[in-house]
Image: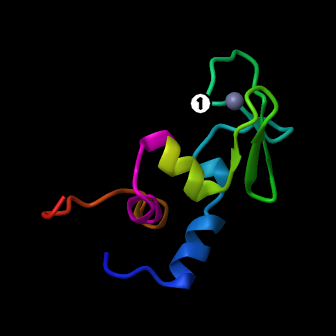
């Protein structure tokens, strides 16, 4: 992937959190950023907030932190559902 466009970044933010996490009916998921048994990560307007550890962010921030990816690779993951191997990495 070359230079990211604004559109690509917006598109990546619009990928639903339900593709990344298992949400219950109240839009809560188990937070991967702290240890817990009952879901306390709440999704609203496709942004996450954790009532347990205070983590908050959009899908790009989530993928970056969860998979420890760069901004560019996080976008690529969100848009393609996968990451292609980059020769110069
Ligand atoms: Zn948490």
- Rendered residue at 83%/38% (across/down): 25
Q: In the figure, 35 relative to 29: above or below?
A: above
| Main secondary structure type of the part rendered in magenta | helix
Q: Secondary structure at mark 1?
A: loop
Left or right? Give the position of 62 relative to 51: left
Residue 31 placement: quadrant: top right
Q: Is residue 24 magenta?
A: no
Tell whether circle 1 marks a residue whose Cβ is less than 8 angstroms from ligand 1: yes
| Residue 12 in the image, given as x and y percentages of width and height | 56, 67
Q: Magenta region: which residues?
A: 66-75
Residue 9 placement: quadrant: bottom right
- Rendered residue at 76%/35% (across/down): 54
Question: Which quadrant is home to the C terminus?
Answer: bottom left
Left or right? Give the position of 87 relative to 37: left
Q: In the figure, 83 relative to 3: above or below?
A: above
- Rendered residue at 70%/15% (across/down): 37
Q: In the figure, 68 relative to 45: above or below?
A: above
Label 1: which residue?
32
Residue 71 placement: quadrant: bottom left
| Residue 83 in the image, given as x and y percentages of width and height | 32, 58
Residue sitting farthest toward the left = 87
The image's colouring method is rainbow
| Residue 21 in the image, given as x and y percentages of width and height | 62, 41
């Amino acid at each position: 992937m070359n230079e990211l466009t604004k559109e690509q970044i917006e598109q990546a933010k619009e990928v639903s959190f339900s593709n990344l996490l298992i949400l219950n009916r109240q839009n809560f998921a188990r937070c991967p950023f702290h240890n817990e048994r009952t879901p306390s990560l709440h999704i609203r307007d496709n942004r996450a907030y954790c009532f347990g550890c205070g983590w908050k962010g959009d899908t790009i921030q989530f993928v970056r932190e969860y998979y420890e990816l760069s901004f560019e690779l996080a976008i690529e993951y969100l848009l393609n559902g996968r990451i292609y191997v980059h020769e110069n990495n």
